[in-house]
Image (cartoon, helix red, strand yellow):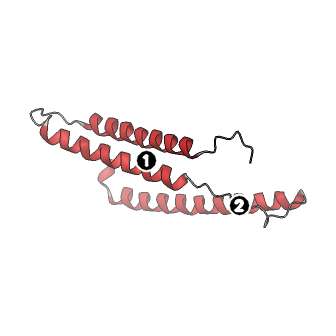
């Protein structure tokens, strides 16, 4: 008998996932408060230190997701047309093309950021 088919396993999975989620939220809040307390102990004002904006972060994520989506779509098309005669599942092509096109998206983001950077050597 397979132990994964029992109703107790399903209930236990829900309990473990819920506990893990709440532990993660507690840990994030705890570390945030601890960081703020450490700043206060060192005489720093935590309100002055705000996260700095990353102007190219949205571009990077956008190109990564576009590349991964393109790779997934191309893998689906190749699986349905080129590898149709093969009986075996072609799972590797999905992962490979998602990684390749996602990497190409990140590389395109790098090239765009490099082109947009000021080339005056940091002197303004």
Residue 109 vertical placement versus 88 (above, below): below
* Disc nearer the start of the sequence (2/1): 2
Identified at 29% across, 53% down, the residue is 5
Residue 56 visible in the displayed image: yes
Q: Gap in Å between the C-alphas at discs 2 and 1?
A: 29 Å
Q: Is residue 13 left or right of residue 49?
A: left
**In-front residue for pair 35/60:** 60
Q: Residues within 10 Å of mark 1 (few under 14, many from 20)?
A: many
Instruction: Specify the quadrant of the image occupied by residue 86.
Output: top left
In the picture, the disc for residue 64 is: 1
Q: Residues within 10 Å of mark 2 (few under 14, many from 20)?
A: few
* Rendered image: mark on residue 114: none
Q: Residue at x 29, y 40 (%)?
A: 94
Describe the element under mark 2 as helix, strand or loop: helix
The percent position of residue 88, horizontal first and vertical second, equals: 17, 33
Instruction: List the residue tagged with mark 2.
Output: 32
| x and y percentages locating residue 109 in the rendered image | 48, 45
**Relative depth, front residue between 77 and 6:** 77
Q: Determine the residue located farthest toward the left in the rendered image.
A: 85
In the image, 119: left or right of 68?
Answer: right
Q: In the current view of this chain or complex, which residue is farthest to the bottom?
A: 47
Quadrant in the picture for residue 41: bottom right
Relative height, residue 31 to residue 110 (above, below): below
Q: Give percent across and percent down for residue 92.
A: 29, 34
């Amino acid at each position: 008998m397979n132990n994964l088919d029992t109703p107790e396993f399903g209930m236990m999975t829900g309990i473990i996932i819920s506990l893990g989620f709440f532990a993660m939220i507690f840990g994030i809040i705890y570390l945030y408060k601890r960081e703020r307390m450490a700043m206060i102990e060192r005489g720093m004002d935590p309100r002055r230190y705000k996260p700095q904006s990353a102007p190219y972060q949205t571009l990077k994520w956008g190109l990564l997701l576009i590349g991964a989506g393109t790779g997934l779509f191309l893998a689906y098309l190749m699986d349905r047309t080129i590898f149709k005669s093969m009986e075996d599942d072609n799972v590797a092509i999905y992962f490979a093309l998602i990684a390749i096109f996602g990497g190409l998206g990140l590389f395109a983001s790098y090239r765009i950021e490099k082109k947009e950077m000021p080339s005056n050597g940091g002197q303004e």
